Image: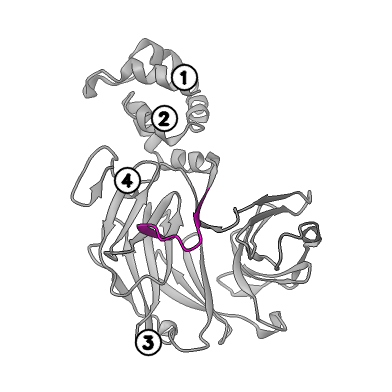
Amino acid sequence: MEKLGEELVASGENAPEDEKSCSDPETESFLFLPPETVFEIISRLPVKSLLVFKTVCKLWCSMIEDRKFVEVHMKRSNTIYVCKEKGDTKEFECLAVKDGLLVEKHRITKKYRIQNPATKYKLDLPDPHHNLKYTKLVYLPSTDTYKLINVYGKKGSRLGGCEVLSIGTDMAWRTLDIPSFYDLNRRRMKGSYGSIDDRFYYMRFSSHQIVCLEMDSESFKILKVPQALFQSWDSVVPISWDKKLSLAKVLGLELHVWVLEDYKKQTWGERKRIISLSFLSNYPNITEKPKPRTFSKGRLQFRSHEDHRIAYYVESGKVHIKYVPEGEKIDYIMHHTLVNPLGVETNRTNKNAGVV
């Protein structure tokens, strides 16, 4: 496949920009294939090859830059586990990952940036009003844009808040007034956060409520959580259950899950879902009960105390574990993708974007 790519690129790479219209014989013969076949073939190639393929002709460039192609390629790319030694302090600290994009903070300058390691796209971000604490990068399909949210607690104060940045368009962070975040710095105000599609969630255990921020409209909603869902709320975590907000807890060798079946009506499932985790007894090296992370298409994912990542296929009973070497931990998990916010070209430089 890579050899095919090299031959096709060689046939058109020396042509003037305005003449690259897929008229070269070798390229043209390949394009006699149905468009959907071409799509299927090249969407399985690595990012490095596709970036070169964009220079072959305008037709291929348009196909590769299309969001549908980007998403299909993203789903087919391999999962990459980036590990680091415990106590290791890299130049940049990774704060959030989404669609192959990394939100990073420089440990010395305290400056923030977003980058795609695969395409070499980089963008320096404006300074937030407060240090990034609970941070998520969210994609909005309605506008084909990315937004970065920061929920924080003010240093030296009991007050907290929320701010949002639209990647590539905002020159400064915008503050959102959400009263439920005012007391984030108070003791016993423990919580857990996450995102599903274009919504950001912050679970407040003390008040049994979930603050939901709809990133498209930048409005928020308070979801009431019935206290009777769990006898004890220790170790309860919010997870995505087939794209639905859920609350999960590991009890012995079982996973107990309540699913928010209807977000608008705030209707929780009538019955608690219980998944057997008896497979854990076959893995004595997993010393403590793992934390559930997501459930999608029959696959449950967990993170162990040792930072191992566990995938359990409920119907088949198959188990796959990504072991982390002793003395290391997973820094972040990502895929190599073609995503560039606002479609910024990787081979061009402007005052906000750079190429390495």
Question: SS at mark 1?
Answer: helix
User: Where does residue 307 sit, x and y in percent of width and height?
Assistant: 60, 60
Residue 35, position in %: x, y?
Answer: 47, 25
Quarter where residue 7 is shown: top left
Q: Which numbered tag is attached to residue 49?
A: 2
> What distance separates the C-alpha of mark 4 from that of mark 3?
36 Å
Q: How busy is the neighbourhood of tag 1: few (under 14 within 10 Å), some, or many (20 plus)?
A: few
Of the image marks 2 and 3, the number of the one nearer the N terminus? 2
The residue where tag 4 is placed is: 121
Q: Secondary structure at mark 2?
A: helix
Task: Report the magenta residues as a range.
Answer: 81-93
Circle 4: residue type: Tyr
Asked whether the residues under the numbered discs 1 and 2 touch, taking CB atoms below 8 Å apart as contact, a structural biologist would say: no
Q: Amino acid at mark 2?
A: Ser
**From the viewer's perspective, is residue 210 above or below residue 86?**
below
- Residue closer to the observer: 229 or 141: 229
**Disc 2, disc 4: CB below 8 Å?**
no
> Disc number at residue 159?
3
Above or below: residue 36 compared with residue 102: above
For badge 3, the amino acid type reads Leu
Q: Where in the figure is residue 347, as x and y percent of width and height?
A: 26, 37
Mark 4 surroundings within 10 Å by alpha-carbon count, few (fewer than 14), some (14 through 19), many (20 or more): many
**Label 2 neighbour load within 10 Å: few <14, some 14-19, many 20+:** some
Q: Residue at x 45, y 60 (%)?
A: 88
Determine contact: label 2, label 3, CB under 8 Å: no
Q: CA distance from mark 4 to mark 1?
A: 26 Å
Is disc 3 placed on a helix, strand or loop?
loop
Instruction: State the residue position of label 1.
Output: 3
